[in-house]
Amino acid sequence: MFNDFKYRFSRFMQGRYGVDSLSRFLSGVLIAIIVLGLFIPIPFSGLITLALLVILYWRMFSKNIPRRYEENQKFLELKDKFMGRFSNFSSNVSQFKEYHIYKCPRCNQKIRIPRGKGHIMVRCPRCGYEFHKKS
């Protein structure tokens, strides 16, 4: 019985887009709104969840695979831009104990200088400009 259902569903999904990163994100937002709606009264939460559910299933069962792929690629680009800011920040925070991080006044190249060396002349590896800093 279960194998028959699984076979029929797999036949139904042939030629359809299925689940991707954008769909997973939308389902996470959907679950978050539902859970928050249990504790906090959110205006129009039922309408928002219904709209997200319709969009989610519409994307999953769509046969326009190139268009859904393009939408997912745009979402991944936005996600990478957003997450890239946080990854750079976390790597800089982990280096603050051992290094000073300065920018070159001429070309804005980031330069990592070890702490505790006193007043030193720093030479930019990109443009060769020398400037004075305290480590």
Image (cartoon, helix red, strand yellow):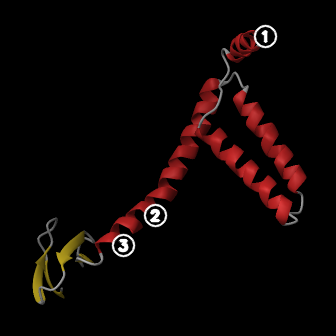
Q: Of callouts 3 and 1, which one flags the residue occurring earlier in the amino acid sequence?
A: 1
- Percent x, y of residue 49: 83, 48
* Dot 3 crowding, Cα within 10 Å, few <14, some 14–19, many 20+: few
Name which residue lies at 71% across and 51% down: 29
Q: Which residue is mark 1?
A: 1
- Residues marked 3 and 1 touching at CB (< 8 Å): no
Q: Amino acid at mark 3?
A: Val
Q: Amino acid at mark 1?
A: Met
In the figure, is residue 46 to the left or right of 2? right
Q: Amino acid at mark 2?
A: Phe
- Residues marked 2 and 3 touching at CB (< 8 Å): no
In the figure, is residue 81 to the left or right of 108? right
Q: Which residue is mark 3?
A: 93
In the figure, is residue 35 to the left or right of 108? right
96, 125: nearer the viewer: 96
Q: Is residue 120 above or below residue 102?
A: below
How far is mark 3 from mark 1, CA to CA? 56 Å
How far is mark 2 from mark 3, CA to CA? 11 Å
Q: Quadrant of the C terminus?
A: bottom left
Mark 1: which secondary structure?
Answer: loop
Name which residue lies at 89% across and 58% down: 44
Q: Which mark is residue 86?
A: 2
Q: Is residue 107 above or below residue 30?
A: below
- Percent x, y of residue 74: 56, 43
* Dot 1 crowding, Cα within 10 Å, few <14, some 14–19, many 20+: few
**Residue 4, quarter of picture:** top right
